[in-house]
Amino acid sequence: MFIQIEPQSDVPIYEQVTRQIIEGIARGEMKPGDTLPSVRALAADLGVNMHTVNKSYHELEAKGIIVIRPKSGAIISSTEERALTPDQLRQIEKNLKPVVAEGMVLGATVEQIEHMMKKVFADLQIPAEGV
């Protein structure tokens, strides 16, 4: 797992960590049952405060993406453990709405936005074996 922090970004560091872990899981770089680095180790690797990584891990746990087990660490949840709920689906829609609205205000068409969504989805898919 490779996480790159952009200190000058408007996005808080804990959110950058959270997003990049989620993208890594979506790409298949990390699989259910895999253990994330300890808070201390990841903070040291990234050169950030431990509380920043801890906040990220707790965000991931609140979303059902990881399970934090004392003495075992943070473990990627299985797909059965993180079945998509109607509330989570509404939250995804809520998060997408401002991005789509911005695109519309800037002049993007429905077709362009659909194309971008499909491209993002394809970019996050696990590459087919032997392709």
Image: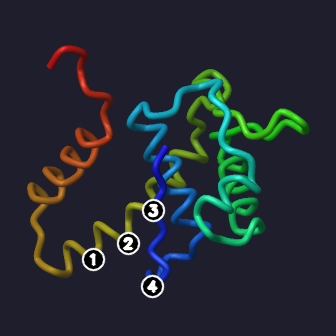
Q: Which residue is mark 2?
A: 98
Which amino acid, mark 2? Pro
64 lies left or right of 30: right
Q: Which residue is mark 3?
A: 4
In the image, residue 43 sits, relative to residue 83, either above or below, namely: below
Q: Quadrant of the C terminus?
A: top left
Disc 4 on helix, strand or loop? Answer: loop
How many other residues sit within 10 Å of disc 4, few (<14), some (14-19) or many (≥20)? few
Q: Are marks 2 and 1 in contact (CB under 8 Å)?
A: yes
Residue 47 location, quadrant: bottom right
Q: Which residue is mark 4?
A: 8
Please report whichever mark, 3 or 2, sits nearer to the chain's N-terminal start.
3
Task: Please report the residue visible at 63 percent of the width from the left and 40 percent of the height from the top.
Answer: 65
Which amino acid, mark 3? Gln
Task: From the image, state whether disc 1 or disc 3 is nearer to you.
Answer: 3
Q: Are marks 3 and 2 in contact (CB under 8 Å)?
A: no
